[in-house]
Every structure is written in C-alpha cells, then in structure tokens.
Image: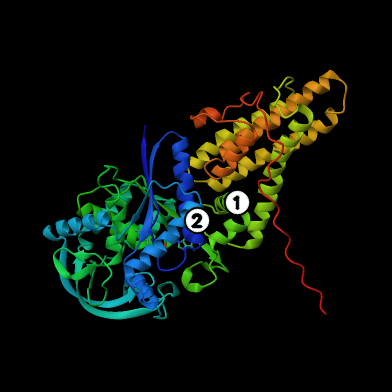
C-alpha cells in the first residue's frame, strides 16, 4: 500500500472561520478521500495556528487568557470541519506540547549549527500577515499594499535564521524539480522572486513585545516568530510516525511566497530534512473582486450555507465552481444556480424517477436488463468514457471538470429515460415493451449507482444515502465498483428520497399599506 501524507494550512484562530478556510479543508478532504478510494494509505493532517500577536491582541480585547481564547476558537474551527465531513486523521494545535517540543529541539539544533545568530532588526512589520516586510514590498507610490493591513516600524534585537546562505541551493532545487509546486506557473513566480538576494529571516520577537509564543531554548527572553513555529506543524505532527516528507502541503496563494516556497524548504534543508514532495496552491474566494477575509467584513459563513442547503451541497458547490489554483467570485446567485440545476434538477430527478418508477412498475424490486439496444449501449459507452476521463482528472486535481463530466452523464441518463418513456411502456400489453421497461429500470438504476460512486469523494453522505435507498451496499474495492454490471438486480428500493429540496422562494416584498 502506498502511503500518502497530505496537510492543510493551519488557520489563525483569531476570528470566525469563513468560506476560504472551509474551502481549503474540503479540497484537501476530497483529495484524501479520492486517494483512499484509489487504495493509498492516507494520513490527513489539519490544525490550528494558535500563537502570535493577532491571537494575543484578540484575547486581550476579550479580557481572557490567550490559552482560554484559543481553546474556544480552535474548537469552533474544528467543529466546522467535523460538520463538513472533513476526514482528517489528526488535528494539530501549535500550543500542544508535542509541537512545542519539536520546535525547540530543531531551534537548538540550528542554533548549535550556527544557522541562527543575533542581530538588530530595524524594519516594518505587518501584524495582519504576521510578516516582516521589506522595501520591495511597497507599492510604487511608497504605500504598503492593502493585504498587509496596519504596518508598524520596529527596532529590536532579534535572532535571525541564515536564509541567504541557502538561496543558491533553493534555486537549484526548484530548477531541478519542475513539478514541486502545483500549478506550475506558481513555481516560475517563486524563481522570479529569488532573482533578488534574500535577507536572513528574523525568527524571534522579544518576550516583552510578544508573550504568546514558543520560547527560544537558548534565550528565554524571546519567543519564536509565528512562521517558524507554524510551518513546523507539518513535521512535528508526524515525527513519531515516520511519515515525513509530506506528499502535499496544501495552501492558499497568499502564503506561498515567501513562507512555504522559501522559508519552509530552507528550514528543512538546514535541519537535514527533505522538503515536502509538492506544494499544492489554491486560489482565493473573492467578494466583489477582493479576497474574502475576516478583516474586510461580510465574509461568507460556511455554516449558514450548510444549514440552509446541506453539507454536500456546500462541498459540491465549492468543488464544482473553483478551478484549483485560480480565483473564484462567490455569489449566492451562482450557488443557487448550481444547487437548482445540477443537484435538485439533474441528480435529484434521476433519483426520484428511479425510485418512483421502480416502485410503480416493478413493486420496488430492481429487475435485470433484458434487451440491450442502441439506447442502452450508448449509456454504457458514455459511462466508460466518463469514468476513464474522470479518474485522471481527479488525479490531476481537476475536480470542477470531473464533476461537470459526471453531471453530463447524469443528464444523458435522464435523456435516456425520456427516450424510453417507461411510463408509456408500462401501459403497453406487448411483452417486448415489458422487457424494455425492465431494462430501462435496470439501466437508470445502474447509471445512478455508478454516477454517485464517481462523486463519492465530493459528496460522501449523498452517495451513502443513494446507495441505501437503492438497497445496495458497495464493496471495499472502489475501482471494482465502477464497472457497469448487474449488481443491483433484485435489490429492494425505497419509495422516495428528498435529497436536495428546493429552497424556499425569497419572501415577497410586503405590499405597501
Ligand atoms: N496561519 C497561517 C498559515 C500557517 S500554515 C503553516 C494562515 N492562516 S489563515 O487563517 O490566514 O489562512 C489559512 C488558509 O486559508 C490559507 O491557506 C489561506 O490561503 C486560506 N484562505 C484564507 N482566505 C482565503 C480566501 N478568501 N480564499 C481561499 N482561501 C483563503 O495563513
């Protein structure tokens, strides 16, 4: 069994989770579930980034200790991911002893090896991004980009990690490993960034400025600066499992350069550890063209959508709408379009018709197919093409296209039903029509079973429900489940299942008095 270790970014837990955080965890979950179906032994890590100035400030604002604050907010993120059916194997919190210990051991190791030194830091700091800024980060007019929020100048003696020394190695590594970052165009951006000389990385904050962090093992007056602490979670969580390096570190594009593409591989290299095999970089959910974020207000709360439309409608929408790597605008209108046309109408109709007609015309027991004509052969041939196209699309993270193709197959099955018109065949006394009726019931049910098997990693609860109303228990080998056959013959189906109820129409504006 091939092992597959995948991680998400760990969220700053200083506010409520929004659509962007939820998207990333669902995307990682879809990949993890897909790899499990393909037979890999998957380890899926997610977690919370609990140190830093932002958390300290938010806790102070609420007048509670930082630890209590992160206990509460972390639990909120985790509860959301549980609700979203995110099948993580481990949830790491950077305030846990298992993490702090590893960070301290590695810091000491780097200090002893001369990779860390003390010097005066004079420069600018963005609390929102928890990032030390450089002159080149300024806009042409001298202002700091909006992304950084409030920027403050600081002068402090601090500890520095020798980044510059490893720059040539990193360029070499990226040049030789062209597929290190997905999508590939991002790797070119990193190489572009590396054309300028790197500054060494400031990795500490004096305790009097920032209390809420991991103490430097060689100087108790300092704590580590957030990124040095946070990045190591991917390693600390599996140090005793022997799973490093990760197959994929999944992140959003805002934290690629420099944290994940520059600091992270160099930190690992200096520690004598291999880099992750790949970084997978997704884009942003936008609102009116700008990155959705808690600081800009009005961010979409995923729980509201889940409460209104269900977990799988949410998972389906984000995977269907977003082309992994690119940005996507979120609008409720677009959510409703996909929900209504693809889930309620297309898939919902196939489910309703299959259950309803099997109940009406076959006493609820799925018959065997008897007469295979062109209409049936077309559906089966389209199935084979769809499956053979969708699996490689999922392997390449093209879930939006994979879902589009799968839904096209569902649509073709609905068209097949229109063509066969079982409601007419049911009225005929001709035995040939009776055989065709049984064939059409068997064909629609088998097509439905296969279509939802192919979407199982995206909508696992829906797949399970549909299998259940079809009276079917799938086998353990997912690939074997994807063969057209007669697995459903003789199964007793339920009469009805309301999967995706139509949302209530918007309230009418009250008539003026
Ligand atoms: N704590 C750091 C990550 C440390 S990883 C060692 C952080 N946290 S975050 O809460 O700001 O972001 C967590 C993840 O959510 C990041 O990968 C980020 O890109 C993603 N998203 C935050 N807003 C987003 C959107 N609007 N759209 C999509 N994902 C975005 O950065």
Q: Are marks 1 and 2 in contact (CB under 8 Å)?
A: no
The residue located at (44%, 61%) in the rendering is 76
**Residue picked out by circle 1:** 313
The residue closer to the viewer here, 193 or 310, is 310
**Residue picked out by circle 2:** 23
Can you give x and y, in whole percent of width and height, for residue 27 in the image?
Answer: 48, 50
Can you give x and y, in whole percent of width and height, for residue 419 in the image?
Answer: 79, 33
Element on which disc 1 rests: helix
Separation of disc 1 and disc 2 at Cα?
A: 13 Å
Residue 328 visible in the picture = no
- For label 1, being within 8 Å of ligand 1 is answered no
Q: Dot 2: few (<14), some (14–19), or many (≥20) neighbours within 10 Å?
A: many
Quadrant (top left, top right, bottom left, bottom right) of the N terminus:
top left
Q: Quadrant of residue 51?
A: bottom left
Residue 99 visible in the picture = yes
Can you give x and y, in whole percent of width and height, for residue 70 in the image?
Answer: 36, 65
The residue located at (78%, 21%) in the rendering is 435
Quadrant (top left, top right, bottom left, bottom right) of the C terminus:
bottom right
Foreground tag (1 vs 2)? 1
- Splitting the image into four quadrants, where does ligand 1 fall? bottom left
- For label 2, being within 8 Å of ligand 1 is answered yes
């Amino acid at each position: 069994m091939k092992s597959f270790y995948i991680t998400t970014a760990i969220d700053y837990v200083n506010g409520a989770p929004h659509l962007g955080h939820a998207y990333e965890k669902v995307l990682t979950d879809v990949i993890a579930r897909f790899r499990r179906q393909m037979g890999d032994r998957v380890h899926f890590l997610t977690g919370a980034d609990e140190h830093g100035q932002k958390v300290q400030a938010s806790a102070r604002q609420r007048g509670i200790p930082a630890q209590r604050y992160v206990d509460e907010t972390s639990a909120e993120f985790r509860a959301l991911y549980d609700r979203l059916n995110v099948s993580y194997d481990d949830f790491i919190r950077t305030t846990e002893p298992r993490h702090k210990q590893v960070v301290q051991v590695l810091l000491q190791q780097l200090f002893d090896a001369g990779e860390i030194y003390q010097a005066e830091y004079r420069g600018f700091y963005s609390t929102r991004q928890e990032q030390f800024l450089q002159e080149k980060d300024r806009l042409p007019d001298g202002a700091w980009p909006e992304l950084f929020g409030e920027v403050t100048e600081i002068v402090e003696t601090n500890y520095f990690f020798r980044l510059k020394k490893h720059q040539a190695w990193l360029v070499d590594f990226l040049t030789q490993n062209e597929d290190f970052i997905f999508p590939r165009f991002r790797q070119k951006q990193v190489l572009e960034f590396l054309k300028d000389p790197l500054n060494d990385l400031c990795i500490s904050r004096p305790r009097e400025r920032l209390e809420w962090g991991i103490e430097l093992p060689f100087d108790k007056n300092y704590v580590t600066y957030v990124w040095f602490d946070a990045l190591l979670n991917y390693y600390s969580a599996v140090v005793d499992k022997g799973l490093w390096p990760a197959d994929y570190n999944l992140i959003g594009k805002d934290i690629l350069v420099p944290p994940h593409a520059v600091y992270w591989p160099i930190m690992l290299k200096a520690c004598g550890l291999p880099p992750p095999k790949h970084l997978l970089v997704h884009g942003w959910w936008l609102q009116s063209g700008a990155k959705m974020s808690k600081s800009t207000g009005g961010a979409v709360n995923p729980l509201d959508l889940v409460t209104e439309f269900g977990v799988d409608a949410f998972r389906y929408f984000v995977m269907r709408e977003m082309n992994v790597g690119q940005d996507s605008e979120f609008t409720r209108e677009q959510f409703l379009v996909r929900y209504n046309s693809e889930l309620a109408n297309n898939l919902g109709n196939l489910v309703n018709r299959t259950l309803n007609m099997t109940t009406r015309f076959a006493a609820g027991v799925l018959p065997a197919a008897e007469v295979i004509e062109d209409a049936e052969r077309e559906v089966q041939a389209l199935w084979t093409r769809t499956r053979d196209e969708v699996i490689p699309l999922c392997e390449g993270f093209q879930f939006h296209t994979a879902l589009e193709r799968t839904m096209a197959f569902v649509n073709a099955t609905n068209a097949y039903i229109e063509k066969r018109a079982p409601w007419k065949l049911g009225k005929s006394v001709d035995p040939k029509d009776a055989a065709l009726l049984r064939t059409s019931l068997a064909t629609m049910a088998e097509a439905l079973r296969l279509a939802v098997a192919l979407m199982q990693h995206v909508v696992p609860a829906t797949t399970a429900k549909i299998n259940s109303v079809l009276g079917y228990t799938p086998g353990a080998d997912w690939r074997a489940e994807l063969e057209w056959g007669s697995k459903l013959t003789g199964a007793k189906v339920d009469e009805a299942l309301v999967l995706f109820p139509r949302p209530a129409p918007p309230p009418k504006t009250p008539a003026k008095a």
